[in-house]
Image (tube, grey):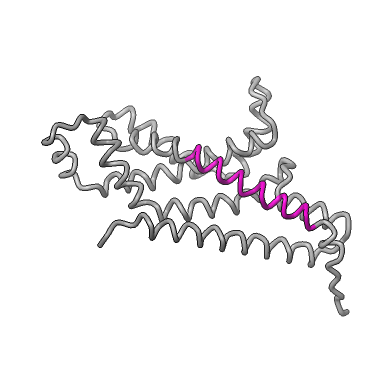
Amino acid sequence: MVYHFNFSAVWASFDLLLYGLGLGFILALVANTIGVGLGLILAFLSISPNRIYRLIGTSYVTFIRNTPILVIILTVYFALPQIGIGLGKIESFIVSLAVYAAAYLAEVFRAGLLSVPKGLHEAGMSVGLSRRQIKFNIILPLMFRNVLPSLSNNLISLFKDTSLAAAIAVPELTFYARKINVETFRVVETWMVASVLYVLACYLIASVLRRLEKTFALPV
């Protein structure tokens, strides 16, 4: 049996695929931004001298990292409304992705904070800087420079994870690819085009992020 390729049905709905691709990137960007804030808080909790704070930080990271992201998505979208917390499809997915990303970013930030020499804190104290000034003007800028490659990889990973939004009918790329597939039965063509779009988007994102890494890299 010889398969005859026919991409006409896919090209007819190509604008939907591009829309879904753009929405997926926005979802990943917003979720990553929220995840960075939450992950940073968790990182500070994890290295806190307070035992209770450390327990809160490590427990969150352990629990979320060992829970499949699809389970988190379905829980937020279907279970939370049962206790009076109703969110839309897009909002539910952003929350789910941010919660998931925060657990991984917390470990990235924790390692980054521990990699900053303790002598810098002492140097800041010696010139009269407050603990807050040392944290925001010395520790955090150095930490972010150290972990920028990991942050870049996380954004790319989150972008690929947006394909799971189709599970709750968020109209991103995978959702529209499934829709075209069902309506036209062009299975091979549809998923070939969707795969190429994902690869190209990830390559472009990686290229931009690598340029940022070089721009903000610490001089050797």
Q: Residue furthest top?
A: 84
**In x, y percent, where is residue 205?**
54, 57
Residue 27 lies within the magenta run: yes
Residue 49 picture location, percent across and down: 25, 32
Rendered view: 73 above or below 14: above
- Main SS of residues in magenta: helix
What residue is rendered at 82% in x and 52% in y?
179
Quick check: is 139 in the magenta stretch?
A: no
Residue 30 rendering spot, x and y as whole percentages: 56, 40
**For the point 28% across and 33% down, which residue is it?**
48
40 horizontally vs 87: left or right: left
Which residue is outermost to the front?
215
The quarter of the image holding the C terminus is bottom left
Residues 42 and 209: in front is: 209
Depth check: give the residue in front, 212 or 43. 212
**Point 48% across, 39% down: residue:** 63
Q: Quadrant of the N terminus?
A: bottom right
Percent from the top left, x then y, of residue 92?
64, 34
Q: Residue at x 32, y 44 (%)?
A: 141
The outermost residue toward the left is 126
Find the magenta span and give its range: 14-35
Q: Please determine whether, in this image, residue 47 is positioned above or below residue 142.
A: above
Q: Which quarter of the picture shows residue 75?
A: top right
